[in-house]
Amino acid sequence: MTVSEGKYVEVDPGVELYVQDVGSGEPIVFIPGFTFTTEVFTHQVEHFSKTNRVIVIDPRSHGRSSITLQGNDYVTHGTDLAKVLDILQLKNVTLAGWSFGCLTIWEYLKQHGYDNVNSLIFIDMSPKALSTNGVEDWVEGPLDDIGAIYNTYLRDPAGQREFIKAYTTSVMVQRDVMEEELNWLVEQSLKTPHYIAANLFASGMFSDYREQAREASETVPTLTIVANHWADKAIAFTQKISPQSSIEVLGGHLMFWEHSKEFNKFVNQFLEG
């Protein structure tokens, strides 16, 4: 049975999430990161839908989902994920989160446990993003740097645009990005208004899912894929926090888009056990 490609799932009264739903077989659910959309997983949908049922979610206030002033935090995103899995009757899923999408998965696990989870893939996100103790662990940055981003760049659309452009060219993609590609990536982010992006940014940076990361690696097969630019710290931190997780290193933060064949190969090997 082939599953239809696009649909909307109501997770709260008046709040619908856009869900891309393609292929048949064991389900893999992809969740994009901060302000990004289903579109970034095009290469994964094309590849894995040949063998699996592939679901990609636009989280609330992202992409084609409803823009809402309520629930723009990763606790609510975890609840939304549970509702999507229930409504689509997805069983024994592989959950794959990129960046802040990992926070959605850890929150889902915190709320609902592992009864419906077959395996987990975490793409380039520390379970504790903010450095608060001066220790150089795998983090996005210290409080002063993160606060400066929040107060400088996420105050208006122009600032959000500037932030995403800079992050794309310095962290997300390793090669020179063509102007058309850069504009497209920025356009995906700006589907989330700046005032909601600011809320999501704060929610993500103040999250701490180290306990869920440890528990996940001990409960189901888990794969962590990290970018080259911070691989040493990310590997050491992952081995300390979630030592049972498999670890791969590839590209920049958007490695599954830039290096899709290598990324898909890692995931295939993981799924095949």
Image: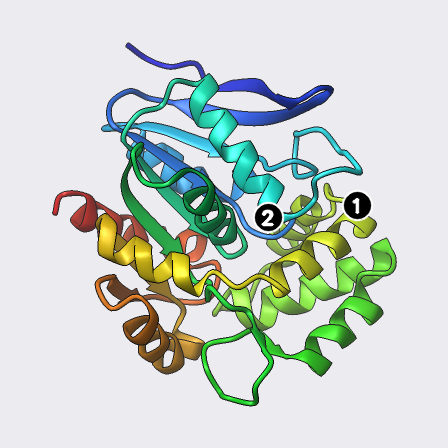
Tell me if mark 1 has few (under 14), some (14-19) or many (20+) residues whose alpha carbon lies within 10 angstroms of its own: some
Front position in the image: 22 or 125: 125
The residue shown at (31%, 53%) is 216
Please tell me the numbered disc located at residue 167. none
Residue 182 x/y as whole percent = 64, 56
Secondary-structure class at tag 1: loop
Would residue 189 be found to the left or right of residue 240 on screen?
Answer: right
Name the quadrant containing residue 3. Answer: top left
Residue 70 x/y as whole percent = 76, 37
Front position in the image: 54 or 134: 134
Please tell me the numbered disc located at residue 74. 2
Residue 114 x/y as whole percent = 31, 40
Would residue 118 be found to the left or right of residue 250 on screen?
Answer: left
Front position in the image: 197 or 45: 197
Which quadrant of the figure contains the N terminus? top left
Query: What kind of residue is marked 1?
Result: Pro
The residue shown at (31%, 47%) is 120
Q: Whole-Å distance between the Cαs marked 2 and 1?
A: 17 Å
Tell me if mark 2 has few (under 14), some (14-19) or many (20+) residues whose alpha carbon lies within 10 angstroms of its own: many
